[in-house]
Image (cartoon, coloured by chain):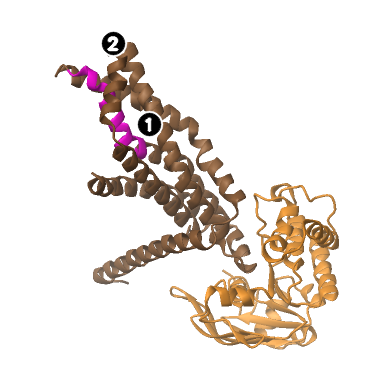
Amino acid sequence: MFTPVQAIGRLTIGYVRNLGRMGWFILYSLYMIVRSPGSPVYILKQMRFIGTKSLFVIVLTAAFTGMVLGLQGYYTLAKFGSEGMLGTAVALSLIRELGPVLSALMVTGRAGSAITAEIGIMRISEQIDALETMALDPFKYLVTPKFVAAMISMPLLCAIFDVVGIYGGWLVGVKLLGVNPGAYFYEMEKSVMWRDVYSGMVKSFSFGVIIAWIGCYKGYFSGPGAEGVSRATTESVVLTSVIILVWDYFLTSILL
Amino acid sequence: MIRLTGVHKSFGAQKVLNGLNLEIPEGKVTAIIGPSGEGKSVLLKLLIGLLQPDSGLIEVDGECMQGLRRSQLNHIREKFGMLFQNAALFDSMSVFENVAFPLQEKTKLTRDEIRRRVLSALEHVGLKNVEDKFPDELSGGMKKRVGLARAVVLDPKIILFDEPTTGLDPVIKRAIHHLIRETHAKFGFTAVVVSHEIPEIFDIAQNVAMLYQGEILQHGTPDEIQASTHPVVKQFISGSLDGPIHVG
């Protein structure tokens, strides 16, 4: 029997230990990327899985996000007689904020969960132990290729999200609601600075690190059996999404 | 030679090994027998450094396995091969790729040489024309054979077998035991076999150690173990329900 104080102590030690393990995991992964990033074949395979296979969901989400921004932005700007600024509003919202965040959340749901499930299944079926018994570092084969692939794929997916979203806003604003097409793109070109693009790219790069980090970590330390993998997958998606949103706030305050 | 001295291992409140002492002689087949849940698989994982003991010493050829950096531990692990209970084949790779993987990663052999060695290892375990199949297309016995081919392909000094015949039918069981004996005779490695297969295991082992309540209860040749008068060993070998081993 534990007293309540012992139970709180045990819980706290558990959380601190987990945090330490998560910290070790990302540091060791980054060290391994520098030391031995893994075969280009593994990295390309992962880029295909994380990047190429996420394209459909990214294009779909981006199109509708841009369209709804066009719709909402038009009615807000029309109140001030500034419909011409619609292109700026859509582009800045997408490039600085919605592009990186929404594309990261989409990739988390599609690829982050799959990364956890794949590594979790390899853990419970002793495939990771098999690598270790061959005196091979599992990070080199399972973790670092995913990190590198996510770091490269996320900014590219974000750029596609931005472009598709801007054309979604154009479709609604210009084609449906009658905003001047010249004004839409001219105002956008005038207002969007290189710094805005840079901050969006930095964000999506860091979100790529977070997706690979939590996805791999949760799979690597997945609990036993199908239930353990299922729990790890759910925790991975929830934790990645929360960390992305919290990290986005801090990064925005630094990059503003 | 592998030597374990005063090895303790617990998982939370559950004590698994309780000051275990054991010497595993070089070049022979040593079988670890004992009731389920007594820590036989844990013992194998300790031997290869997948788990660390809470206290005690594990030495492989005079080198201590504790407190090593990953690179030092990997240096010792290069002496080992392991056949897992469920074979632990990489499910995203074909049979050929599974067996070729250690050769590709640990040697500088040419592609042709790797191919020759993989096919020879597969042939030795009695498998032909399965190179392009994936693990989920194989039967349990075939998976074990591929796992054995992968374990021997680097010609290791020590091979650990974790319940190599669990879940197989009697004919396949006998075939796997025969294969272990043949492979051992051909390659001359030190083998540690964790098994429940009584009395078949006595035919392939030169040494048998009975693990019970976290300690080695008895250690000797198969004949000595079979002639044992210790009530626990007697009950385990006979499979009787009456005796000091409680079921459930």
Query: Residue B60 at what x, y percent from top left?
Result: 64, 83
Secondary structure that dominates the magenta span? helix
Q: Earlier in the sequence, mark 2 or mark 1?
A: 1
Near mark 1 (Cα within 10 A), the count class, few <14, some 14-19 or many ≥20, is many
Residue placed at 82% from the left, 70% from the top? Answer: B183
The image quadrant that residue B196 belongs to is bottom right
> What residue is shown with label 1?
A162
Mark 2 is on which residue type?
Gly
**Seen in the image, is B204 located left or right of residue B245?**
right
Queried whether the magenta region covers residue A193, the answer comes back as no
**Residue B82, percent from left and from top:** 68, 68
Which residue position is annotated with label 2?
Answer: A178
- Residue at (68, 73) in percent of width and height: B80
Which colour is chain B painted? orange
Q: Secondary structure at mark 2?
A: loop
Seen as rendered, the residue at the extreme left is A80
Q: Quadrant of the C terminus of chain A?
A: top left
Q: Is residue A86 magenta?
A: yes
Few, some or many residues within 10 Å of mark 2 (<14, 14–19, 20+): few
Q: Mark yes or no: residue B38 visible.
A: no
In the image, what residue type sits under mark 1?
A: Asp
Above or below for B125 versus A153: below
Alpha carbon distance from label 2 to label 1: 22 Å
- Range of residues picked out in magenta: A82-101
